[in-house]
């Protein structure tokens, strides 16, 4: 979900007022959003063909591949994602460009005026502003990411998307979505619409059963990984196959084995839609060119890198649940096989996350964890809880006041080989790191 923009931004004062209209940051319901859509003249009914994406992990990366493929084909793309990392503008792309401060301010001012002080969450107001902007600017397609869950998410006022896409589902947000993976899957399945194709990533069997049952109920054609389409990695390349044929494509630009699956899901979604027919060269350009910040992103310059020991590697990932930790650890394992380096993990998390489940993934890769707070956020996990979780796993855990201070502390250690440093545990921490490093998403 999106975080509140600082009041120093052009839209900051409006956002502060909107934030005060509903006491809960997260309150899953469609009633307020449906009212606001009617007051705005139903912009959700005036959107370009929309691909609606839900899931636990990989939503942003899948959208990045979709966007890159569409743009490689010369199409104009609107995009809505959350949360933003540094600036709220990142959440809304109009025709491929980040929304301008002026357009964002005008959209929020319009939503505030139309809402007239009624109860609304900040995410609902943001989503309403995005729909207003998307309906007011032409484009060939809209890529729409669910904020939380699916069934009651603010984005789910879309009545007839071109396709529903569901990325891998795992345990997360149990306080809102349920305490079993089946309950969470049922909430994510809420974006499946009657007779609208649904493209499903590789899932746990019990998750797949929930999704496919909902699709059958709504007569939604399913395109499931491992059944209707397949991916493999051969000689470092992505091989995609479905009933229309086989494509041998370049490896995804985004790092990690899991990115082959995300890229494959994006390809499967497009090949399920008859209105989009692209040559393999278009898919290859998109897969090889996609960018998405704070997903195994290597920082090769900037303020924070200069604080670390000379010639260190600095990586950033916003993964924050147990499954996210697993794919990050898998990627780090691949790096270690290629170029061995001592690994240090700098971690900060929100209080509602599973610190033990996340950190357990790194137990075989490192014993050196540095716990840090997330600046300027309410509801963060105290560093003492991170220390307890790490030490219970047999890790050596230190604390630092910030990611920068943690990097500086590494200079006192005598490394024979410069370390590989990963900063992870929260997208909010990742956004702060990018801002402090001077690496702004574009």
Image (cartoon, rainbow, N blue to C red):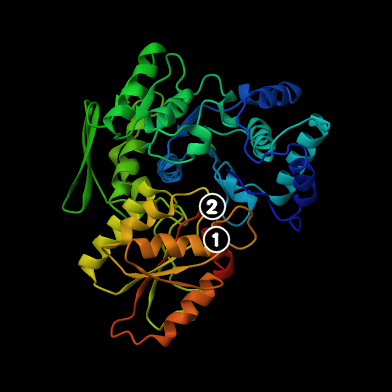
Q: Is residue 214 above or below residue 52?
A: above
Confirm or deny contact between disc 1 and disc 2 (CB under 8 A): yes
Which x, y percent locates residue 126? 67, 39
Q: Is residue 398 above or below residue 142?
A: below
- Determine whether, in the image, residue 61 is placed left or right of residue 42: left
Q: Residue at x 33, y 43 (%)?
A: 263
Along the viewing direction, whichever of 170 and 335 lies nearer the viewer: 170
- Determine whether, in the image, residue 247 is placed left or right of residue 46: left
Which of the numbered marks, if any, corresponds to residue 382?
1
Q: Picture quarter containing residue 281? A: top left
Which residue lies under the disc numbered 2?
Answer: 351
Q: Picture quarter containing residue 139? A: top right
Residue 273 visible here: no
Q: Residue at x 76, y 41 (%)?
A: 18
Q: Is residue 275 above or below residue 378?
A: above
* Quadrant of the rendering where the N terminus is positioned: top right
Label 1 SS = loop
Residue 29 visible here: yes
């Amino acid at each position: 979900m999106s975080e509140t923009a600082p009041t120093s931004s052009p839209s900051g004062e409006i956002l502060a007022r909107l934030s005060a209209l509903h006491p809960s940051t997260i309150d899953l319901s469609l009633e307020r959003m449906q009212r606001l859509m009617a007051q705005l003249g139903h912009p959700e009914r005036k959107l370009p063909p929309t691909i609606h994406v839900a899931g636990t992990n990989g939503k942003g990366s899948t959208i990045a591949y979709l966007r890159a493929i569409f743009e490689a084909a010369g199409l104009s793309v609107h995009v809505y994602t959350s949360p933003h990392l540094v600036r709220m503008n990142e959440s809304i792309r109009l025709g491929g460009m980040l929304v301008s401060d002026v357009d964002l301010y005008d959209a929020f001012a319009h939503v505030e005026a139309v809402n007239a002080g009624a109860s609304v969450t900040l995410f609902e107001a943001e989503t309403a502003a995005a729909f207003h902007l998307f309906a007011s600017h032409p484009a060939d397609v809209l890529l729409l990411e669910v904020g939380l869950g699916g069934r009651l998410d603010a984005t789910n006022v879309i009545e007839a998307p071109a396709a529903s896409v569901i990325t891998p589902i795992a345990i997360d947000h149990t306080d809102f979505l349920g305490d079993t993976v089946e309950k969470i899957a049922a909430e994510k399945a809420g974006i499946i619409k009657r007779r609208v194709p649904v493209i499903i990533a590789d899932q746990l069997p019990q998750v797949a059963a929930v999704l496919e049952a909902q699709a059958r109920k709504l007569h939604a054609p399913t395109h499931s990984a491992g059944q209707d389409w397949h991916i493999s990695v051969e000689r470092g390349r992505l091989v995609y196959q479905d009933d229309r044929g086989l494509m041998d494509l370049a490896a995804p630009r985004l790092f990690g084995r899991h990115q082959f699956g995300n890229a494959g899901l994006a390809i499967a979604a497009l090949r399920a839609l008859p209105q989009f027919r692209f040559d393999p060269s278009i898919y290859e350009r998109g897969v090889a060119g996609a960018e998405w910040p704070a997903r195994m992103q290597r920082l090769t310059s900037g303020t924070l890198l200069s604080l670390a020991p000379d010639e260190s590697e600095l990586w950033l990932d916003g993964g924050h649940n147990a499954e996210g930790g697993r794919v990050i650890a898998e990627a780090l394992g691949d790096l270690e096989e290629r170029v061995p380096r001592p690994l240090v993990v700098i971690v900060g998390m929100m209080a509602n996350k599973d610190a033990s489940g996340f950190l357990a993934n790194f137990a075989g890769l490192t014993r050196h964890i540095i716990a840090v707070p997330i600046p300027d956020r309410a509801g963060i996990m105290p560093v003492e809880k991170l220390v307890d979780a790490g030490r219970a796993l047999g890790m050596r855990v230190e604390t630092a006041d910030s990611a920068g201070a943690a990097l500086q502390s590494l200079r006192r250690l005598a490394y024979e080989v410069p370390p590989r440093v990963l900063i992870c545990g929260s997208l909010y921490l990742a956004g702060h790191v990018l801002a402090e490093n001077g690496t702004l998403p574009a």
